[in-house]
């Protein structure tokens, strides 16, 4: 079974806002492909408050986030980055792009901005192989990469 990791903004959003596109992506994705979210196991953040950083919970410390999310990127077949509407670069997403680049993982970037920071800032721009403008298009690209002919 193929694995896709769903990267994108979390800090500055509520849990529901951060999870919404990931849920939509997962629902549209072929069942032979697993989608992994950095929010899994962090349902304690679903309190309606804006997520502001790391927390003392075992899965939400800075080190725990780096270890688990880094492992997810290292073991995924494709990295999807949702950059729709972003105004600044996420440190965590940048780090995930760096891991993907180092391991030559395919990266699908969803953006509605021609000058999206992830497309114009080196070295992140070098890691992006596919640029799409919607979740639907990203699903199509991921399925084309992961599913046999």
Image: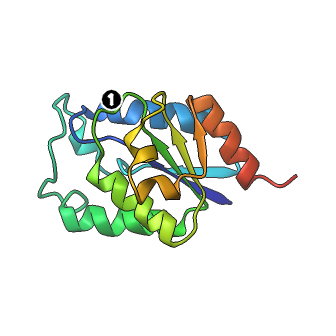
How packed is label 1: few (under 14 Cα within 10 Å), some, or many (20 or more)? Answer: some
| Residue 30: image location, x then y, percent | 70, 42
Q: Which of these two is toward me, 82 or 64? A: 82
Q: In the figure, is residue 94 to the left or right of 26? A: left
User: How many marks overall?
Assistant: 1
Q: Is residue 73 above or below residue 11?
A: below
Residue appearing at x 40%, y 59% in the figure: 96
Q: In the figure, is residue 26 to the left or right of 33? A: left
Q: Which residue is mark 1?
A: 17
Residue appearing at x 66%, y 59% in the figure: 2
Q: In the figure, is residue 78 to the left or right of 120? A: right
Q: In the figure, is residue 12 to the left or right of 78? A: left
Answer yes or no: is residue 30 visible. Answer: no
Q: Secondary structure at mark 1?
A: helix
The quadrant holding residue 26 is top right
| Residue 134: image location, x then y, percent | 56, 28
Residue appearing at x 48%, y 33% in the figure: 111
Question: Farthest residue in the right direction?
Answer: 149
Residue appearing at x 43%, y 69% in the figure: 71
Q: Is residue 70 above or below residue 56?
A: below
Q: Which of these two is toward me, 125 or 134? A: 125
**What colouring style does the render use?**
rainbow
Question: Farthest residue in the left direction?
Answer: 56
Q: Quadrant of the N terminus?
A: bottom right
Q: Which of these two is toward me, 91 or 118? A: 118
| Residue 142: image location, x then y, percent | 66, 46
Answer yes or no: is residue 70 visible. Answer: yes
């Amino acid at each position: 079974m193929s694995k896709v990791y769903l990267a994108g903004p979390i800090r500055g959003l509520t849990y529901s806002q951060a999870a919404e596109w990931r849920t939509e992506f997962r629902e549209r994705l072929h069942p032979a492909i697993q989608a992994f979210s950095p929010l899994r196991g962090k349902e304690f953040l679903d309190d309606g408050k804006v997520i502001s950083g790391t927390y003392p919970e075992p899965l939400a410390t800075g080190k725990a986030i780096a270890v688990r999310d880094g492992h997810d990127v290292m073991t995924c077949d494709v990295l999807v980055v949702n950059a729709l509407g972003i105004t600044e670069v996420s440190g965590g997403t940048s780090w995930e792009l760096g891991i993907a680049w180092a391991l030559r993982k395919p990266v699908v970037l969803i953006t509605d901005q021609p000058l999206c920071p992830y497309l114009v800032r080196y070295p992140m721009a070098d890691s992006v192989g596919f640029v799409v403008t919607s979740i639907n298009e990203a699903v199509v690209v991921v399925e084309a990469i992961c599913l046999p002919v």
